[in-house]
Amino acid sequence: MLNLPSPVPDMETRDFWDQAKHGVLTAQQCQACGSLQFPAYACCQRCNATDLKWSAVSPHGTIYTWTTVHRSPRAEFAGRVPYTLVVVEIDGVKGLRYPGLLVNSPPGQPKIGLGVTVTFEEISDGYRLPVWRLDGDEPESE
Amino acid sequence: MWSLKDKCIIAGVGMCGFFRHCDRTEASIAVEAILKALQDSGLTAKDVDGLITYTFNNDSVRPQEVAQALGIRNLRLWIENWNGGTVQASLLAIAVMAIEHGLAETVVVYRAAKHRSGRVRIGGAGQTADTGGLEQFLVPHGWANYFVDQAAGATRHMYEYGTTEEHLGAVALLAYANAQENDSAYAKGYGPKTMEEYLRSDYLAHPFRRWDFASEVDGACAYVVSRSDRAADLPRGAVYISALAQGSSPTLMKAGRYAQFDFAGDNATVGAAAYLAKDLFQRAELSPKDIDVAMIFDSSSFAVIKQLEDFGFCGKGEGGPFVASGAISLRGKLPVNTSGGLLAEGYMHGINLIKEAVLQLRGDAGARQVRDARTAIVTSGAASSLGGGIILTRR
């Protein structure tokens, strides 16, 4: 379990977090044109339809970019530094990108283009946070 | 010709600070900056009938309060805008359009904030974890302030174009060097002096070090907009508002209260500047090579590199070598951020860049003066996917 603050979902995002609790990564999918988008938007960015559903996407992606936070002024994160945040592009859906924690950072710097897979870590209040693990690494035992 | 070109002028500028810590209220420091700007323009509060301000998360002082303090008899225009530094071009546009159409005659644009000592801090200190809205997807991971976004953007640019930490350092070192010639700068007497010193300092969010971020300060800044027919009355000369433009990337960022996520499309490496540059230069009837001095919105050192590329001062991906070449130093061919900018004069969301452009064009920049400065560009937030640009000229 990671000691991280829980999200505060709204009506439109509740299902994202419910599916995350079941280990499923989702994006908003437009029921009219099929377009996928993330994070949540009020309507389809492509066709402006408002019927959007959170649909499963591939749990695999590649690192589009990253940063490593070495200092945080916020108490919740100060004790965790250094930690690495990545922007992950989902395999097969160009431009569909997720921000998230990289939980098994290598020594040295992460490399753009490396493959990652989502994993769902329990945080506070029963939420599971979709975070990322570099492919080719054994998952650590708890 | 653009219908608003040179119809209005910036008649005066004023500043209060900038300070590491100021115990006075935002209202007090705003009024001081405004009164200085009015004095600089040969006007008084009695002449003011328009007040425009902007905030970042509600951190300024409202026009009504300023109007009351100044004893303004008939306030005919009052505008408060959020969105921090991206809105500057639009605020100037509102002032120009209002004056041109007789809605107001003398408009003061001001900004006051206590970012360092007050309740709203850009770096996120002092804020409790706000994890609703966009933040629900960012903050639980520890993606908790605006600088994280810019740092990750810089990483992508380094990957695509080979930009290096030394390139970032070149921007930061120049900012702090310029600030030493500026009595208003927060960083006067402070800051890194050599590349070794810069590279030795710790990362805050890779690749950024403390020197790569705009500096939180307390302070205020104001400028006065009038019709161009007032130009002859001004003892220090008039600065003409020759062009304004705003624009966005086709894939806008998601912006929350404390953090943003700006990685759609090519936003990491190409900002709003690329989408508005053509309008801006066309309206001014100028091209990048005509610009004598450039105030580039430096929320980070990387933001300068990105915008120099996107406004066309150098090719895409060449911003790093360009800033390292000496071209942007005070004696270079395109001096940038001669006051120290947001990095080292202080992060007042860009209004102080307008101030510095005016001083340069009037020949009032003292030890920082660029010779024969007749045209200036000021950018507003245009490294992100939303932003603007302003071109000011001197006849």
Image (cartoon, helix red, strand yellow):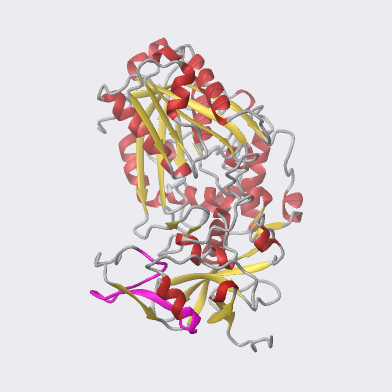
Q: Would you place residue A130 above or below residue B223 in this image?
A: below
- The x and y percentages for residue B80 are 41, 35
Q: Which residues are magenta?
A: A20-41
- The x and y percentages for residue B86 are 44, 44
- The x and y percentages for residue B96 are 33, 28
In magenta segment, residue B29: no
Q: Would you place residue B9 above or below residue B352 in this image?
A: above
**Which residue occupies the foreground of this view, A63 or A124?**
A124
Quarter of the picture containing the C terminus of chain B is: top left
Q: Residue B73 occupies which quadrant of the picture?
A: top left
Q: Would you place residue B167 above or below residue A114 in this image?
A: above
**Which residue occupies the foreground of this view, B268 or B318?**
B268
Task: Report if residue A90 is visible in the image.
Answer: no
Residue found 63% across the figure and 43% down from its top: B215
**Which residue occupies the foreground of this view, A58 or B244?**
A58
Q: Residue A112 occupies which quadrant of the picture?
A: bottom right
Residue found 49% across the figure and 43% down from its top: B56
Residue found 39% across the figure and 77% down from its top: A93
